[in-house]
């Protein structure tokens, strides 16, 4: 049995996850649950500088999110990268044998679409404020598209990518 404990933010309650041969058990505050590996449908690994996050989605029991940090009460955190790395690898090993889950890295497509839409809206508002025109002229559309492409390129590395449980992308492990 492998156990991992983290606290994703100062306001979050500590989350404990225990990995067994055919299922995992989790507990956060007074809530707890069990995910059979066969019921896990998706795993997403994310990274933001030195914070690493794993989202584990069950087919009907919801999801849990774990990070490589344990936040303390004084706005500081313990870096639990070594334990997180071990946990992620062991969990993937169990999923290889017992699950048909999909494995992704990066941000979801919905979040990227939201960013692109907000960027387009922001560029349009900026152009209206700058030119005083509320119409959609060729130049406004051109600037909007250019800004949207700039944002898209800057977040490209966060685009969702598929991987296999046997081949965890090392850039998403601490």
Image (cartoon, helix red, strand yellow):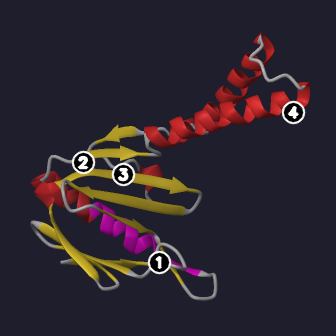
Give the mark nearest the N terminus, 3 or 1.
Answer: 1
Q: Position of residue 138 (x, y in %)?
A: 76, 11
Left or right of 75 on screen, residue 31:
left
Residue at the extreme right: 131
Can the viewer see residue 174 in this picture? no
Mark 4 crowdedness (10 Å alpha carbons): few <14, some 14-19, many ≥20: few
Q: Which mark is residue 44?
A: 3
> What residue sits right under mark 1 in the picture?
12
Which of pointers 3 and 4 lies earlier in the amino acid sequence?
Answer: 3
Q: Is residue 6 visible?
A: yes
Horizontal side, residue 26 vs residue 139: left or right = left
Relative image position of residue 164 (x, y in whole percent) = 27, 43
Q: Is residue 85 magenta?
A: yes
- Disc 3 and disc 1: Cα gap in Å? 20 Å
First in sequence: mark 1 vs mark 4: 1
Separation of residues labelled 1 and 4 (CA atoms): 40 Å
Q: Which residues are magenta?
A: 77-89
Q: Nearer the viewer, mark 3 or mark 2?
A: 3
Front one among 41 and 172? 41
- Whichever of labels 3 and 2 marks the residue nearer the N terminus, that label is 3
List the residue tagged with mark 2. Answer: 166
Q: CA distance from mark 3 to mark 4?
A: 40 Å
Check whether the beta carbons of the residues at disc 3 and disc 2 lie within 8 A of each other: no
Residue named by callout 4? 129
Q: Secondary structure at mark 4?
A: helix
């Amino acid at each position: 049995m492998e156990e991992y404990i983290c606290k994703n933010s100062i306001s979050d309650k500590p989350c404990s996850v225990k990995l067994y041969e055919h299922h995992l058990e989790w507990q956060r505050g007074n809530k707890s649950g069990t995910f059979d590996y066969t019921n896990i449908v998706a795993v997403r690994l994310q990274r933001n500088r030195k914070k690493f996050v794993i989202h584990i989605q069950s087919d009907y029991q919801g999801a849990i999110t774990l990070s490589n940090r344990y936040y303390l009460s004084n706005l500081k955190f313990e870096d639990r990268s070594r334990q997180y790395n071990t946990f992620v690898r062991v969990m993937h090993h169990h999923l290889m044998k017992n699950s048909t889950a999909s494995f992704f890295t990066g941000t979801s497509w919905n979040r990227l679409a939201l960013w692109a839409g907000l960027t387009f809206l922001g560029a349009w508002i900026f152009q209206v404020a700058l030119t005083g025109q509320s119409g959609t002229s060729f130049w406004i559309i051109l600037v909007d598209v250019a800004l949207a492409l700039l944002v898209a390129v800057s977040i490209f590395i966060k685009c969702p990518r598929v991987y296999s449980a046997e081949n965890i992308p090392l850039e998403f492990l601490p």
